[in-house]
């Protein structure tokens, strides 16, 4: 049964409530300063097995724990509690389709930007269909905004406030007629997109900036590296990438839990190869969607079934 969005259930501080009854204090540090850390988790419906699979939950909760630690927040919830909350709220909504789940741990109460608690958590699952095909590529611009760095606001922490940097780059790109942006870091090397990581292909070699290039330690990025090496036999390296390599590469794509794999066919007005979605990009996209939907026996270990069947 489909409910209107405001009647869908969310999990807030241990209770499952309709979205329009989930309230957060407007004076809390999360509301005033973006003092929250979060994960965007995908769950994919497998029609054959009549099962919904959460993708790489263990890795998402490890990253959330890392964000909590670096950000010096009280560590209130165990991984088991976080996972149980996610399962309970998905079941409450009876979702039998592809969904995206926002799981956010936030600083509540009446403190300031330097409070460590009290801690709240919400878990909000919403329907989100997968990208069906890769017919059209993105036109991207290298941003005039520099990616945040370890010297100011670590991109390794998935904190709400980091997205102001992403917002500036994305808004600039849209204003200038592009679809999205690609950041350079403080070293002048390519880092990532506003909400995604970047791969390019040169002479058959798949390349992506290292985790020290001012990027989020993306779970999709790590998944793609493993699938490329272990299943597709594509040589894959993590190394610094220069801006002008984007102008002469054979293929480029952005990736993330939300966007999955999105080909980039133009950077700063330079057409990537012939402007069509590349062969390696298509192979990776196909393999990725097979794995996330539970159609690869080898990678079942990355999936958590939601329903008891
Ligand atoms: C800045 C940034 N980089 C990369 C990613 C991709 O990370 P993941 O693959 O874990 O979703 C995201 C996703 O939200 C992001 O916000």
Image (cartoon, helix red, strand yellow):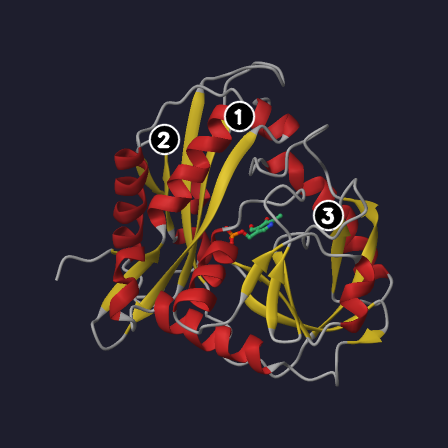
Q: Residue 13 carries which label?
A: 2
Q: Determine whether label 1 and label 3 are within 8 Å by CB.
A: no
Left/right of residue 34 with respect to residue 7 in the rendered view: right
| Label 2 to label 3: alpha-carbon separation | 28 Å
Q: How crowded is mark 3: few (under 14 residues within 10 Å), some or many (20 or more)?
A: some
Q: How crowded is mark 2: few (under 14 residues within 10 Å), some or many (20 or more)?
A: some
State the image coordinates of residue 202 (x, y, percent, origin top left): 68, 72
Q: Residue 167 carries which label?
A: 3
Left/right of residue 190 with respect to residue 60 in the rendered view: right
Q: Name the residue under label 1.
A: 70
Q: Residue at x 56, y 35 (%)?
A: 157
Pick whichever of labels 1 and 3 is earlier in the sequence.
1
| Label 1 to label 3: alpha-carbon separation | 23 Å
| Circle 3 SS class | helix
Comparing marks 2 and 3, which lies closer to the viewer?
3
Pick whichever of labels 2 and 3 is earlier in the sequence.
2
């Amino acid at each position: 049964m489909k409910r209107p969005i405001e009647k869908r259930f969310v999990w807030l501080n241990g209770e499952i409530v309709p979205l329009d009854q989930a309230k957060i204090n407007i004076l809390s540090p999360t509301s005033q300063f973006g003092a929250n850390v979060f994960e965007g988790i995908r769950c994919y419906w497998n029609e054959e097995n009549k099962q919904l699979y959460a993708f790489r939950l263990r890795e998402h909760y490890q990253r959330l724990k890392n964000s909590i630690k670096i950000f010096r927040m009280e560590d209130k919830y165990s991984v088991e509690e976080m996972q149980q909350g996610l399962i309970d709220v998905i079941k409450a909504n009876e979702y039998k389709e592809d969904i995206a789940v926002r799981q956010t741990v936030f600083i509540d109460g009446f403190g300031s930007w330097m409070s460590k608690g009290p801690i709240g958590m919400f878990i909000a699952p919403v329907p989100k269909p997968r990208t069906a095909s890769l017919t059209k590529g993105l036109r991207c611009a290298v941003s005039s905004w520099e990616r945040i760095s370890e010297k100011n606001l670590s991109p390794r922490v998935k904190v709400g406030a980091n997205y102001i940097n992403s917002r500036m780059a994305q808004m600039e790109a849209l204003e200038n007629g592009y679809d999205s942006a690609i950041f350079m870091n403080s070293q002048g090397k390519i880092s990532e997109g506003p909400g995604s990581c970047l791969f390019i292909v040169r002479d058959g070699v798949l390349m992506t900036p290292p985790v020290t290039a001012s990027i989020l330690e993306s779970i999709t990025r790590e998944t793609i590296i493993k699938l490329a090496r272990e299943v597709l036999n594509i040589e894959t390296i993590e190394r610094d990438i220069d801006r002008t390599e984007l102008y002469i590469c054979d293929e480029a794509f952005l990736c993330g839990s939300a966007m999955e794999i999105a080909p980039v066919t133009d950077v700063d007005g330079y057409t990537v190869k012939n402007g069509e979605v590349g062969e390696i990009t298509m192979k990776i996209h196909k393999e990725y969607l097979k794995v996330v939907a539970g159609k690869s026996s080898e990678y079942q270990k990355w999936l958590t079934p939601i329903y008891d069947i």
